[in-house]
Amino acid sequence: MERTLSIIKPEAVARGLIGDIVSRFEHAGLKVVAARLTRLDKQRAEAFYEVHRERPFFNSLTDYMSTGPIFVSVLEGDGAIARNREIMGATDPAKAEAGTIRKDWGTNVEANAVHGSDASETAAAEIAFFFNADEIQSSGS
Ligand code: CDP
Ligand code: MG
């Protein structure tokens, strides 16, 4: 069993897509073991995306991520990290495969509906960024 962090980004939350997107996770065999609606201020968005600080899109991305509520969740399942990346689709919605979350609901490369952890180390750090251990339900219980 593996865990990954998912974020439904501000525009997708504002458009009322939480239910549709979570449904994709569940249909893909990913179990929601923690979830919360929250909001990042600019500083916390910068901390979350620290690894991208030198990238040209950093300032715009962290502005965008602090424009409104986000839906954060921990998804659990076999190969959850890769499975989630698969159903999310490519970073740029225009390049994402048909039937992926980003193809169906992403607006552009920045407002691309969802974030998903990319490796086990980043997943662990990103989960801890949003959730305490006692807020995560083991799927066995
Ligand atoms: O989210 P993903 O792992 O697919 O892509 P990333 O390369 O880790 O980039 C993180 C986020 O930065 C993306 O999801 C986009 O929201 C944003 N981004 C952007 O605004 N412009 C780009 N050229 C690349 C990424
Ligand atoms: Mg990434």
Image (cartoon, helix red, strand yellow):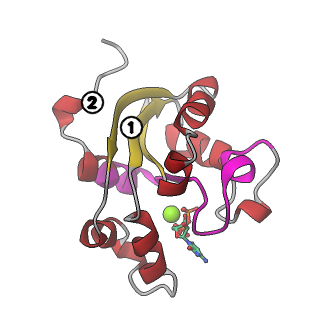
Residue displayed at 63% across by 24% down: 27
Query: For numbered disc 2, what is the local secondary structure?
Result: loop
**Is 19 left, or right, of 74 in this rendering?**
right
Residue displayed at 57% across by 42% down: 84
Residue 105 forms part of the magenta stretch: yes
C-alpha separation, residue under disc 1 versus residue under disc 2: 8 Å
Percent across and percent down for residue 89 are 68, 52
Residue displayed at 39% across by 37% down: 74
The number of discs equals: 2
Q: Label 1: how many residues lie within 10 Å, few (<14), some (14-19) or many (20+)?
A: many
**Is 72 left, or right, of 96 in this rendering?**
left
Residue span colored magenta: 99-126
Pick the quarter of the image with the C terminus: top left
Q: Which residue is mark 1?
A: 74
Query: For numbered disc 1, what is the local secondary structure?
Result: strand
Residue 3 forms part of the magenta stretch: no
Above or below residue 16? Residue 105 is: below
Residue type (three-letter) at the residue carrying disc 1? Val
Percent across and percent down for residue 10 are 47, 55
Pick the quarter of the image with the N terminus: top left
Answer yes or no: do the residues labelled 1 and 2 have beta carbons within 8 Å?
A: yes
Q: Is the CB of mark 2 within 8 Å of ligand 2?
A: no
Residue type (three-letter) at the residue carrying disc 2? Ile
Percent across and percent down for residue 68 are 40, 57
68 vs 82, nearest the viewer: 68
Q: Point out the tag, 1 or 2, that comes first from the N-terminus.
A: 1
Q: Which residue is mark 2?
A: 136
**Is 129 left, or right, of 108 in this rendering?**
left
Residue displayed at 78% across by 64% down: 94
Percent across and percent down for residue 111 are 58, 63
Q: Label 2: how many residues lie within 10 Å, few (<14), some (14-19) or many (20+)?
A: some
